Image (cartoon, grey):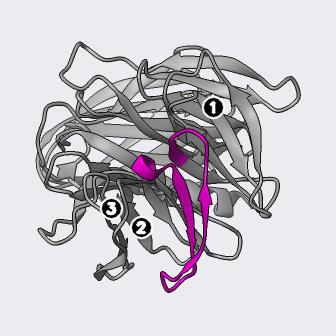
Amino acid sequence: MIKLYVLIFIIVSSVVYAQEVTTVLDSPDAVVDDALVLDSRGNLFGSNFFGDSVYKITRSGEVSVFVSGLANPNGLAFDRQGNLFIAEFSASMIHKYDKEGNLIQSFPVDGIPSGMIQSRFRNSIIYTDVRNNGINELLSDGTVKVLYKGEPLNAPVGLAFDRRGALYIGNFNDRKIYKLNPRSEELEYIATVPDSGTDFPFLGFITYANGSLFGTVYGEHKIYEINPREIDDVSIFAGSSNGAMDGDITKATFSYPAGIVANRTGTALYVSELSGIGNIRKISKKPYFPYRSFALEILRNPVKDILNLKITSKNEGSINIMIYSLLKGDLIFESQEFIEKGAFKTQINLEGFRKGGYILKVEKNGDKRSKIFIKN
């Protein structure tokens, strides 16, 4: 069992997960500037609000028109049978299409439908009404149930469910996010996503992944992460100035980010841009094994009184050696050594250490190694 723990720790400590931004759609013939949704097979669908079409982007990157001829297509959502619902913003309609893009049924609605999401509790579609500040549910028989209406909703657009089925709503106008309590039918304030006074200070869409909400603010050119368990716990997740730079998330830029959706595993976010170009960007976690400037080896493990180390370095330099308790994480020992290029051996006296597990950490010019050892 000890050997298994050591192996798991070594693997986890060796792999680093980098957040990377890539452009997955950049086509002059397919402009996606608004809502996004993924089907059960991982195909991405996106609407062109300032056009008339909804596009389908397959996992292999093939792009096609799924539906056209709509008046400002906005929110998108699938039902449990894989039918796609599209909110036609300027026509006050919601349309239902089969998997091939054939129209099944159209539903005229009161108000202006915008954001949409599949209900977690039944085969129905929940949608926002930006004119009447409402949250409505389109039932399978075509009837509409009002879930909430009025203040503090202010042109609601974004909708997201967390893993427990709580529904979150984002206001377009004032960027406030609320949670709908299904029992009391009241809204609970979560956060206000900031804006610094930009030319387009509006909250686009929201999504949920890995315990957090993510929302886009057009004029800030940023994606924000919101902690739904605290009040006003908001941080910048990605983006800075207006741009289209791919690469590491700390350097990547966005241009008026709008739609946002997470995949099922929470390992990727897709973002559309209201930039006139119609790009779709993907933020994903990719594992890589970093460059190793030195190797660390514990010569005998478990250890009795003397910890024998072998360090093989590609160049000379100073190293920091630290030992932490495995259970509490307290720093117990720390020293600094200078090593030459090649193999270097050193010993650490553990006579005053209690029996149990410890973490050995060695650092050299920002490059780190970790090992677990047992003191008998």
- Residues packed near mark 3 inside 10 Å, few (<14), some (14 to 19) or many (20 plus): few
Amino acid beneath label 2: Phe
Which quadrant is home to the N terminus?
A: bottom right
Residue pictured at 55% horizontal, 65% vertical: 95
Q: Would residue 97 be counted in the magenta stretch?
A: yes
Task: Give the alpha-carbon distance from disc 1 to disc 2, as whole Å.
Answer: 25 Å
Q: Quadrant of residue 23?
A: bottom left
Residue pictured at 29% horizontal, 82% vertical: 62
Circles 1, 2 touching at the beta carbon (< 8 Å): no
| Most distant residue in the bottom direction | 100
Amino acid beneath label 3: Tyr
Percent x, y for residue 290? 27, 56
Viewer-nearest residue: 203 or 369: 203
Q: Which residue is mark 2?
A: 45
What secondary structure is found at the residue carrying circle 1?
A: strand
**1 or 2: tag closer to the N-terminus:** 2
Residue pictured at 46% horizontal, 38% vertical: 214
- Image position of 142 (left or right of 249): right
With respect to residue 309, does 11 lie above or below?
Answer: below
Q: Which residue is mark 3?
A: 288
Numbered disc in front, either 3 or 1: 1
- Image position of 300 (left or right of 138): left
Circles 3, 1 touching at the beta carbon (< 8 Å): no
With respect to residue 141, does 328 lie above or below?
Answer: above
What secondary structure is found at the residue carrying circle 3?
A: strand
Q: Would residue 240 be counted in the magenta stretch?
A: no
User: Magenta segment, which residues?
Assistant: 89-115
Viewer-nearest residue: 52 or 234: 52
- Residues packed near mark 1 inside 10 Å, few (<14), some (14 to 19) or many (20 plus): many
Percent x, y for residue 63? 28, 79
Numbered disc in front, either 1 or 2: 1
Q: Is residue 300 visible?
A: no
